[in-house]
Image (cartoon, rainbow, N blue to C red):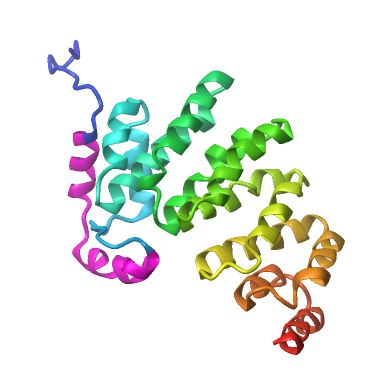
Amino acid sequence: MNRKTGVEKKAPSAAGVRDSLRKLSNREKAEFFPRFFKSDPENRSEGDLFLGVTVPLQREVARSFHDLPLKELELLLAETTHEYRLTALIILVNRFTRSRSDSERTELKDFYLAHLDGVNYWDLVDVSAHKILGEWLVGRPRGERLASLEPLAASTDWWRQRVAVVACFPLIRRSEFSEILWLAESFIGHPHDLIQKAVGWMLREAGKRDLELLRVFLQEHAAVMPRVMLRYAIEKMDREERNRWLGMKARKG
């Protein structure tokens, strides 16, 4: 009960998040978002609904529900409406980032991995994978890192595979490249552009920190890499070097 207003304060709930987001719905954006996010059977995202709420507005809602219990987050992550899941992930990321307890961070990481069925769009992966799983991997022994990444990489689900790749970002920022090089080799012939782009993106980030390491990788693999993956990996190189690597791919093709 609020002593000033006499109004009983309601506990934060999934229903409260849904109501807040519905009030921010934008019809024009709701019609555009499915095309932008490619919600079709080929991308394994068929059936999502969109309210048309922008990410900055979702972040505002997430701040208002920062103490939402995990059982309520679980309800949101099971929703078919895209913004409900994204807002839930933003709340989870914020909570993980604030936590200074390793046991709590591990609990949140485990919760995240247990609910990856709800992380089935590239934006949902990219807003959460490196900030939860990736940050949890930092400082862990190699065995613990692989125990988390290997099941995701071995999955037939493209989104879990992308989670594994994007989770390497905090390691790359610390010039720890073993995991991304292993994953890049594992996915060198992957057929889907969402994985090709993610691998190329992470290789590019590795190259920003160790260009020679990237060149060594490309020397071995550029000729057989999907063109999208290669283009993403070499994007920050000068034009002459980019053309040299692309020429190697063209000769092989």
Asked if the magenta segment contains residue 206, the reply would be: no
Q: Is residue 6 above or below residue 127?
A: above
User: In terms of depth relative to the viewer, which is nearer, 201 or 90?
Assistant: 201
Residue 32: x and y in percent read 28, 70
Q: Main secondary structure of the magenta part?
A: helix
Position of the C terminus, as image quadrant, is bottom right
**Residue at 62 percent of width and 36 percent of height:** 147
**Residue at 48 percent of width and 25 percent of height:** 107
**Residue at 26 percent of width and 58 percent of height:** 48
- Report if residue 183 is visible in the image: yes
User: In terms of depth relative to the viewer, which is nearer, 40 or 209?
Assistant: 40
The magenta span reads 15-43
Residue 46 placement, left or right of 237: left
**Residue at 39 percent of width and 36 percent of height:** 91
Q: Is residue 94 above or below residue 224?
A: above
Residue 6: x and y in percent read 12, 14
